[in-house]
Image: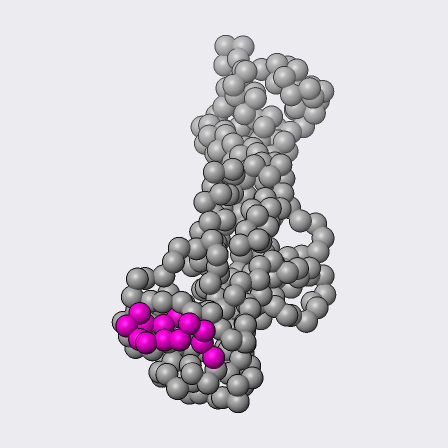
Amino acid sequence: MREISLDRLRTLVAIADLGSFAEAARVLHLAPPTVSLHIADLESRVGGKLLSRTRGRVQPSAIGHTLVERARRLLADAEQALEDVERQVQGLAGRVRLGASTGAIAQLLPQALETLSQRHPAIDVQVAVLTSQETLHKLAEGSLEIGLVALPQPPVKDLRIEPWRRDPVMAFLPARWEAPDVVTPDWLSAQPLILNDNTTRLSRLTSEWFASGGRQPAPRIQLNYNDAIKSLVAAGYGATLLPHEASTPLPDTRIVMRPLQPLLWRQLGIAHRSRDIERPTQHVLDVLWELSAG
């Protein structure tokens, strides 16, 4: 089945509006035979007459009127689509898909999204909750534009992975506990623990920290949602190890934070495709880089 050209529909609408083949040719900057050819092609396609001449003026027939009204909507939609794409190319609007862990989404992204909404309100950031490995996989297959991932990560073809933030991991303890000023693996391993599940980079970091003191404690519960972990700490259920981003509010007053000995750091990186970065994506990257210092 032959498709109908938008150029031919535009010619039909122009004739219906102007009432003249000659006027339509002038307005559309087409030769008169070309206008006639467009209408003949449309009539051949639909199998009926689209125009009739009444009192010296060309008007749509019944089926022509139906096609003219549909053509107006199609042409308007096509024009709107081009304008939307042009705005995206110019960086004025667009969609950016971003993958990150729950911790980054809860603690870091809100600041970036607030700044972005002030500068570029027409850019829509769609956020997916993913592990670092899932994020890198989706970036590589093209279903994400940006990822916030735990470091280190092995190189991935056609992706750029750069260090973004380095935040200290702290002990989060129920305030009613009698806790030392500095928390060691030996002391913390003797307490009830709430830790990240073993699918996360933070879980591996904390396991290595405990191992540095010759400890391998079994947590009471493992979760992959830092805010839920903090709620359990506040309730006195146990202690945890979590990153503390300097720009985020202090935790619940029922929680105290203590530094670790030895020190432990959580490093995050920004991953994105190494070439052909669209302007909306670059605007999101620019905002994220402003948070790199914490």
In this view of the protein, which residue sits in the foreground, 139 or 289? 289
In this view of the protein, which residue sits in the foreground, 169 or 82? 169
- Magenta stretch: dominant SS? loop
Could you tell me residue 43's position as x and y percent? Answer: 58, 33
Could you tell me residue 139's position as x and y percent? Answer: 61, 62
Q: Does the magenta stretch include residue 14?
A: no
Residue at 58% of width from left, 15% of height from top? 20
Could you tell me residue 2's position as x and y percent? Answer: 62, 44
Could you tell me residue 246's position as x and y percent? Answer: 48, 56
Q: Can residue 3 be seen in this view?
A: no
Residue at 52% of width from left, 69% of height from top? 131
Q: Residue furthest top?
A: 55
Residue at 58% of width from left, 71% of height from top? 133
In this view of the protein, which residue sits in the foreground, 262 or 1? 262
Query: Does residue 12 appear left or right of residue 259 in this picture?
Result: right
* Vertical placement of residue 1 versus 151, above or below: above
* Vertical placement of residue 85 versus 110, above or below: above
What span is in magenta? 172-184
* Vertical placement of residue 161 versus 5, above or below: below
